[in-house]
Amino acid sequence: MTVPWNTFGFTGDVPVQAIADPYNRLSESSESNNQATTSFAILTRPDVSVADFGLADLEIVEGITQTASLEVTNSGQTAAGTAMYALYDGNPETGGMLIGEGALTLDAGGTGTVDVVWTPSGLGQHRLFAISDSMDAVNESNEGNNLSWLDVYVGLTDPILLDSGSAGEPAFSPTTGYGYVDEGQTDMIFTCGAGTNPVETSRRDPLGEVVYQFEHLLTGHTYHLDITLYECDGAGRQESVFVDGYQLAGSIDLGDRQIHRLSLLLDPAFYIDHKIRVTVQAPGIDGALVSEVNLHDIDYRYADAGGYLDPPYTPAQGYGWLDGIASHAWGILPYQTTRVEQNDNELRYQFDNMDPANQYNLNLTFYQPGAPGRIQEVWIDGAFSGLTVDTWDFQTHRETISIPVSAYSTDGSVLVSIKRTDASSGAMVNEISLEEETLSLSSGCFVTPTPYFSQAYGAVTVSGQPAPTGTIVQALNPRGETVGCFTVGSAGSYGFMRIYGEDTSVNPAIPGMRDNELVIFTVNGEDAVSTPLLNWHDDRANHNIALASGGIQGQSILMRTGWNLTSLNVEPAYPLVNLVLDSIDGRYDRVLGETGIYDISLPPEFITLRELHGGQGYYIHMTSTTSANLLVNGLPIPASTPIPLHQGWNWIGYYPSGVLPIAEALQSIDGMYQMVHSLDATYDPSLPPYSTLTEMAPGQGYLIYMNQATTLVYPTGTSSQLTEGGQDAVTAATEDACDNVMISPEFTVVYGDVTVNGAPVRAGTKIEIVTPRGEVAGCRVVTQAGIMGMTHIYGAYEDTVSGFEPGEELSFRLNGIPVQSDPVLVWQGDMEAHPVMIEASWPTIYIPFVNLGQ
């Protein structure tokens, strides 16, 4: 017998009882077997739903394909069979657009994923709807959970490149989300020259405010606002750039007729509402103008070193620190917090996922409020970047380095090392960020032409490799004004690049080169070494000039107050005196070379020393009241590079990177020289006991007297260490006790034996040489009993140092007591070594011994 049965919504194990003759209408032989009981398992119907769905990036760029993953589950106890799962842009019940769908078969309690590809269109807010069982193929227990949604924002596609004043420049509209906003009096179009270059067309507002608006920016993205400002009408505008009413740049003087290209990093706080308003303002009656306004969505990765936004490196993160510890000892602001490496002298960060098609800059902040300062170099992938930072001034140093494409073109990664050079530990940085560069990629080249020009062409390399297409080569005059520009179109070569001369026939004058000035070349903004050097003339000729950037190294030299005798072991890219000494600008007034002089107070026509080169010695007079570090960038000079010497006095430099004993350093010219002077010590190979110059060191200059012309070649290999009691000990002992002596380039040298009462004078005795006016013009502390080592006696030098005058008698003092010398010497600035004997007879003083215990 079959009986229909309804479960009445029961689920799980349900007991069922069957009864025979339930109404007792039959007379049975046995009434005890009329009942039977069993249990049935009652299962729930399928219930499919989208448990979760999302996108790899919730801030989506229009036109960039995304994949949405729908995580589907069947919470029912029976199989759902095959069903369709769909994704809509907007509610499908009110006209939402189907993005895509996929079929999925789910067992009881099963899960699965449906991937739907979406190429978003339409800027602004979107609500995505995920529909389970969109074709109603499954008899579900719950139809009310088949709809899920997710809110996303679709932003602008970058880059937005607006050539202001051009015929096709768009006005702002909500549909495009960008363009100019013409308010007040009607904007005017201004054209310079032929108007064929973007910089030659401008939008001008008569009331002094050109406005642009950009909408649909994404708060999780970082943007560059690149603006080009240029005028050719001579109005001399002073322009400023504002974003949402906040000034980001200016006042910028357009009266110099230079092209001013600004690349402004936007704070995400500006576009928390997904839009910005850009205003270029100029006070006065000439109106504001702008040549280009561009917006770029960039790759920007920031680390507040030592702060809470300082991520450790992981491959998933793609950047971060590799070593060091965080410190808040100097404060909690980003520029105050620091990461410091206490185990060695190298602190490292790594950046991955760099696109070889893009150019990147590295931004760094160095700050410390007090001693001890640090001298640090920045290296990229094991190569010196050319940046050396000295924090002994206790100022905030914000530095930017252009990263060579060759560093990441193969592996997409760079290792940044901050190396401390003045100690074995303590390398540190306060902020570090990787920032995609946009300006050079979009700006191209433009220079105001004049009727006067020369041309350069040739090979161009970056870190030894052919410069890639798109590389920007620029020519600058000594005043830093761009006078020539070329965009590399064929890898490894540039030109013909016109380099324009100054035009003073117009008002205001157009900046340019002046006759015989040295042309300075840069490659992507980095100094380039030019071979040969090019001195400009209005010759309209072609000059083959090879350019090499990258591989530049730095040298740091501590400069004391007053006169210094120094040298370089790098060859400056541009050896003009003022450019080489730029790091101590305003702290020096005079430079002496072997054959010329540079004086900041002299007119150019009277200057006879115009360039500084490696391998030569120079006297530099520092006017600052404290010491300073001279930082020079250039190509490293191999230690074995020959230095030609002539008969007589030579002012030479020192190439090796470490200290060498002087006899070892000069072994290639052994027997061919008579004497060597440093700033305050002397070496005579025939008089070693009296010689006070025992080592040669980097950064120091030397005067050497040659018996004949020859070539000096410094030895290569491991440098010897300073020896105990050598030059360091002599210099330290003398400096500590003789810090009142003013050094000058005019000097003579004395040396000899010193006795008191017939016995050699004791070590530690202070010997002073005094002028007739009581000035101490020479000083030496005895380090070997009975011997006065070779001591410099300085003469007055112009207005910088007081001292002996020619023909004045030298007076000696031992520990402040006047003594006689034999012979009596008169001063002359001959740089020769003069022997002298000092014999003092002092009365013996007997002090009675009193024993208080008797």
Image: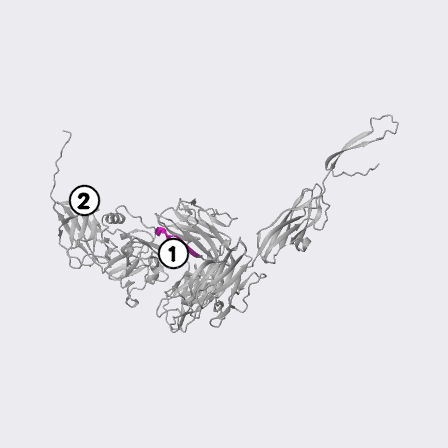
Q: CA distance from mark 1 to mark 2?
A: 47 Å
Amino acid residing under circle 2: Arg
How many C-alpha atoms fall within 10 Å of the one at disc 2: few (<14), some, or many (≥20)? some
- Residue 492 in the image, given as x and y percentages of width and height: 46, 64
Chain-order first, disc 1 or disc 2: 1
Residue located beneath label 2 in the image: 762
Q: Is residue 145 above or below residue 647?
A: above
On residue 452, which mark appears? none
Residue located beneath label 1 in the image: 553
Q: Is residue 507 above or below residue 665?
A: below
Q: Is residue 853 left or right of residue 564?
A: left
User: What kind of element bears circle 2?
Assistant: loop
Asked which quadrant contains residue 515, the reply is bottom left
Asked which quadrant contains residue 157, the reply is bottom right
Q: Is residue 22 left or right of residue 618?
A: right
Along the line of sight, which residue is nearer the eye, 370 or 729? 370
- Judge whether residue 412 can be spotted in this image: no
User: What kind of element bears circle 1?
Assistant: strand
Q: Which residues are magenta?
A: 387-401
Along the line of sight, which residue is nearer the eye, 810 or 751? 810
How many C-alpha atoms fall within 10 Å of the one at disc 1: few (<14), some, or many (≥20)? many
- Residue 381 in the image, given as x and y percentages of width and height: 44, 53
Whether 520 is among the magenta residues is no
Q: Is residue 309 above or below residue 28?
A: below
The overriding secondary structure of the stretch rendered in magenta is strand
Along the line of sight, which residue is nearer the eye, 473 or 253? 253
- Residue 18 in the image, given as x and y percentages of width and height: 81, 32
Q: Quadrant of the C terminus?
A: top left
Amino acid residing under circle 1: Gln
